[in-house]
């Protein structure tokens, strides 16, 4: 996330509102985007977080942390990227997404994504859903592996989108968390929102949080970690990772919400979308699909067993 340091001169900037001052000096960022950064606690004058209407004085030292403006998206291209298809018909494709595959193009990932692969294997998705992420009705983080469903027709996209929005879909994840979770099962229900100081992160201490619920069940306890089956009721960004971290049991290998210093290395974040259940757009029959732990995470479990 870019950071900019500025000093208010004896004339330039004197008496200006903080948001106006910054909008004039950050290329490509609108005043509304500047306000968003300020509201998230990203602007400091001296050592104090200031609001958008703060009037600047000569000599004020301003530091702002903001999200870089996204470049205009280029045309989507089909790419020969292998996919593991669990199920496909005229309406849907169910995939087992590998780790490190970004779902759709965005900043830093203009190509080489799941969408680029879909356009090659299932070109009809180009006309389905959002033009910048065709066919996509839900996402997994780049390093999260597991089962996903993609729409192959506009009708299927609308039907599935409605299910995810209204929580008709059922999802379970497998997560290896730090510490020994003593309760056999439980619910985490801290509301979530943007971190008050770091806009790219989510937090249980957000200024405008939204309801979030996550159920968990212990699958196996190791020396200093616990394998959990996790069921998110709501679908907030990074929900499982933030909830487990707030509970004192961050996901192993999580570079954002995990332990700053882990006693051993992990190949990636240990979070895997294990099952997905949804109503089929045509038959409305409930279908359930499962993805076993991939080899890299199975190797982690084998190591944890040896450490017991």
Image (cartoon, helix red, strand yellow):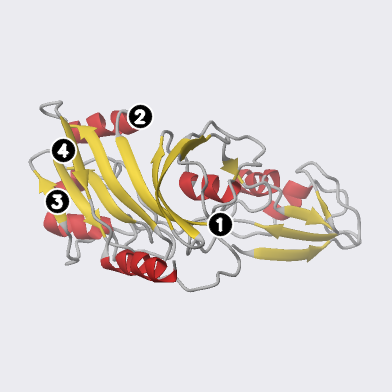
Q: Residue at x 28, y 53 (%)?
A: 146
Considering the numbered disc 2 on the image, is that residue within a helix, a strand or a loop? loop
Q: Residue furthest front?
A: 308
Residue in front for this viewpoint, 197 or 261: 261
Q: Which residue in the protein does label 3 denote?
A: 86
Q: Residue at x 20, y 52 (%)?
A: 95
Contact? badges 1 and 3 (CB < 8 Å): no
How far apart are labels 4 and 1 at the CA level?
37 Å
Q: Earlier in the sequence, mark 3 or mark 2?
A: 3
Tell me which label, 4 or 2, sits earlier in the chain: 4
| Label 4: few (<14), some (14–19) or many (≥20) C-alpha neighbours in 10 Å | many
Q: Position of residue 50 (x, y in %)?
A: 80, 47
Residue at mark 4 to residue at mark 3: CA–CA distance: 18 Å
- Kindly identify which numbered label has been placed on residue 153: 4
Give yes or no for contact between labels 4 and 1 (Cβ–Cβ under 8 Å): no
Given residues 245 and 23, the one toward you in this image is 245
Tell me the SS state at disc 1: loop
Q: Which residue is mark 2?
A: 167
Q: Hey, which quadrant is residue 130 in on the image?
A: top left
Q: Nearer the viewer, residue 95 or 277?
A: 277
Is 196 on the left or on the right of 79, as rendered? Answer: right
x, y (%) of residue 36?
A: 63, 45
Quadrant of the rendered image containing residue 24:
bottom right
Is label 4 or label 1 in front?
1
Q: Which residue is mark 1?
A: 257
């Amino acid at each position: 996330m870019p950071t900019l340091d500025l000093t208010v001169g004896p004339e330039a900037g004197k008496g200006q509102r903080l948001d106006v001052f910054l909008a004039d000096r950050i290329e490509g960022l609108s005043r509304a985007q500047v306000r968003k950064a300020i509201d998230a606690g990203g602007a400091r004058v001296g050592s104090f977080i200031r609001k958008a209407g703060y009037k600047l004085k000569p000599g004020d030292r301003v530091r702002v942390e903001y999200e870089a403006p996204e470049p205009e998206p280029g045309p989507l291209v089909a790419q020969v990227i292998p996919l593991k298809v669990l199920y496909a018909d005229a309406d849907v494709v169910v995939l087992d997404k590998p780790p490190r595959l970004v779902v759709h193009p965005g900043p830093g990932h203009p190509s080489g994504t799941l969408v680029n692969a879909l356009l090659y294997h299932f070109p009809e998705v180009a006309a389905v859903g959002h033009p910048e992420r065709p066919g996509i009705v839900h996402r997994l983080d780049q390093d999260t592996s597991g089962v996903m469903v993609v729409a192959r027709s506009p009708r299927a996209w609308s039907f599935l989108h409605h299910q995810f929005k209204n929580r008709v879909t059922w999802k379970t994840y497998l997560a290896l968390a730090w510490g020994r979770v003593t309760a056999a099962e439980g619910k985490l229900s801290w509301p979530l929102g943007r971190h008050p100081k770091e806009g790219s992160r989510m937090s249980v201490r957000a200024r405008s949080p939204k309801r979030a619920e996550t159920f968990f069940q212990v699958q196996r306890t190791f020396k200093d970690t616990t394998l959990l089956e996790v069921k998110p009721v709501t679908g907030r960004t990074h929900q499982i990772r933030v909830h487990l971290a707030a509970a004192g049991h961050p996901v192993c290998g999580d570079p954002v919400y995990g332990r700053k210093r882990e006693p051993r290395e992990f190949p990636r974040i240990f979070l895997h979308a294990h099952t997905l259940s949804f109503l089929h757009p045509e038959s409305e029959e409930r279908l359930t699909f499962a993805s076993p732990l991939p080899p890299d995470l199975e190797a982690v479990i084998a190591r944890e067993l040896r450490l017991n």
